[in-house]
């Protein structure tokens, strides 16, 4: 089946667990069912207050470590080869995406930092999880909106990101902006009807139980995004509304040097997209269940890495079966103490929220595991970068050769 049934340790469905955990990212408050009295008191509205007594401190994301500042620009895309599953004849699938890229150092600071999510999408997200807090607590990213692209004489290698079920394209911003700061163009996409997304006209789309979106649909979205990459590389603006693009973006991307990664459902989609599209030269699945219809069963002779937790091969037969179809370079690593939601922005934002609200340690561990948050972030910054550097840029990255003293938490599974 396509939407993998998954029960968390707290008895929540995977979708509910993701939503409640991600709301904690957005506002520093929502946690899985079974809130403590302290947390309820901290989040309960005070008399005459619409937003309650939430902490006033904005949550933060760690800065990327690369030499370049980061730029970003959202894109409104329309795939005229696929009908919109919820609209009438003549309506086509529409997506929101973001291009993240290395920005020109001399100019980046003059451009404002982008929010983690747009206001409309964030408010819909909070309404969906039933938590009313001030959206201004959401973090800012390191991405300067519309900043000119840093051009070094070479086109930028490209990485496409696919999010998990019922999530949004911002949920792995830590990894995305890390790659961009090291010279990659990263395209993140909201999978409409499986995401919280806001279009330029203010229309907000939320995950729909009546419009099933499967891993194969995520994969089709990713392949369409690659078509848009080719257009950008050729000097064509794919934005439906004719948005003015950052200086230097047209012609900056390298459509012949492409990788893809995804978390959870997006990890499964990465395998399907690679199996169908030879343009994707390297793939990374971040705790992908590898369960879908059709299952990712095609042999792949291109490099593939798995970062696992709850869906490790030892406990997930689908992942083990997929592993046997990898005929090229392959690697399976696992961070000790990580759970499904450890990989992503949850790793840093949930612990921050817990400190602000006085939530118990056990509550945090249910959401993001026992891995130290700072170490978890460094792992997410280091290993995807090393993988794409090795296989898209052919830069020696000995970090992937085997266990590292710098990252003793990371186990290699042969």
Image: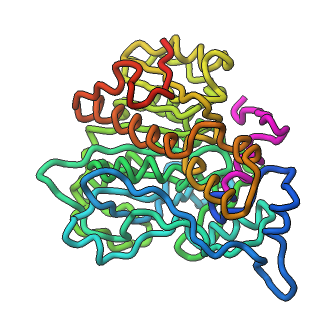
Closer-to-camera residue (152/193): 152
In the image, residue 164 above or below residue 359? above
Q: What colour scheme does the image use?
A: rainbow
**Horizontal relation, residue 228 to residue 115: left or right:** left
Residue 310 in the image, given as x and y percentages of width and height = 66, 29
* Residue in view at x 72 percent, y 73 percent: 54
Q: Quadrant of the N terminus?
A: top right
Give the residue furthest to the bottom. 48
User: Count of labels shown?
Assistant: 0
Residue furthest to the left in view is: 153
Q: Which residues are magenta?
A: 1-23
The residue located at (33%, 60%) in the rendering is: 70
Image vertical order of residue 347 relative to residue 369, above or below: below
Q: Is residue 125 visible?
A: no
Residue 19: in sight, yes or no?
A: yes
Q: Is residue 77 left or right of residue 212?
A: left
Please say if 228 is above or below 249.
above
**Residue 258 in the image: above or below residue 409:** below
- Residue 9 belongs to the span the image colors magenta: yes
Q: Residue at x 79, y 68 (%)?
A: 42
Query: Is 223 in front, or is 390?
Result: 390
Quarter of the image where one finds residue 318: top right
Residue 326 placement: quadrant:
top left
Q: Determine if the magenta segment contains residue 350.
A: no
Q: Is residue 90 left or right of residue 225?
A: right
Residue 119, x across and y down, in percent? 60, 73
Report x, y in % for residue 367: 70, 44
Residue 97 picture location, percent across and down: 47, 58
């Amino acid at each position: 089946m396509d939407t993998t049934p998954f029960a968390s340790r707290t008895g929540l469905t995977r979708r509910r667990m993701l939503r409640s955990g991600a709301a904690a990212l957005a506002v520093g408050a929502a946690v899985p069912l079974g809130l403590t009295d302290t947390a309820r008191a901290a989040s309960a509205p005070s008399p005459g207050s619409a937003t309650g007594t939430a902490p006033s401190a904005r949550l933060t994301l760690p800065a990327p470590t690369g030499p370049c500042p980061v730029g970003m620009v959202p894109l409104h895309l329309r795939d005229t080869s696929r009908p919109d599953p919820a609209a009438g004849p003549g309506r086509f699938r529409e997506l929101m995406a973001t291009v993240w890229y290395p920005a020109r150092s001399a100019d980046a600071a003059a451009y404002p930092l982008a929010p983690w999510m747009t206001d409309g999408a964030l408010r819909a997200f909070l309404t969906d999880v039933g938590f009313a807090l001030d959206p201004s607590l959401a973090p800012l990213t390191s991405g300067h909106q519309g900043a000119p692209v840093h051009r070094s004489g070479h086109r930028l290698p490209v990485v496409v990101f696919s999010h998990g079920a019922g999530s949004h394209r911002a949920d792995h911003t830590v990894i995305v902006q890390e790659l961009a700061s090291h010279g990659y163009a990263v395209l993140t996409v909201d999978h409409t009807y499986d995401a919280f997304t806001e279009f330029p006209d203010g229309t907000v789309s939320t995950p729909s139980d009546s419009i099933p979106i499967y891993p194969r649909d995520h994969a089709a979205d990713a392949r369409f995004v690659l078509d848009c990459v080719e257009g950008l590389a050729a000097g064509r603006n794919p934005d439906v509304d004719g948005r003015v693009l950052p200086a230097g973006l047209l012609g900056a991307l390298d459509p012949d040097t492409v990788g893809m990664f995804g978390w959870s459902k997006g990890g499964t989609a990465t395998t399907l997209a690679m199996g169908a599209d030879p343009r994707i030269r390297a793939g990374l699945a971040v705790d992908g269940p590898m369960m879908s219809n059709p299952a990712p069963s095609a042999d792949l002779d291109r490099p593939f890495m798995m970062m696992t937790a709850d869906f490790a091969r030892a406990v997930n037969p689908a992942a083990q079966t997929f592993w046997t179809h990898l005929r090229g370079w392959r690697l399976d690593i696992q961070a000790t103490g990580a759970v499904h939601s450890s990989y992503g922005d949850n790793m840093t934002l949930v612990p921050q929220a817990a400190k602000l609200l006085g939530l118990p340690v056990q509550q945090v561990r249910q959401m993001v595991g026992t891995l130290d948050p700072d170490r978890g972030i460094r792992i997410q910054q280091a290993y995807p970068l090393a993988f794409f550097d090795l296989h898209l840029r052919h830069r020696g990255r000995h970090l992937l050769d085997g266990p590292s003293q710098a990252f003793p938490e990371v186990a290699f599974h042969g």
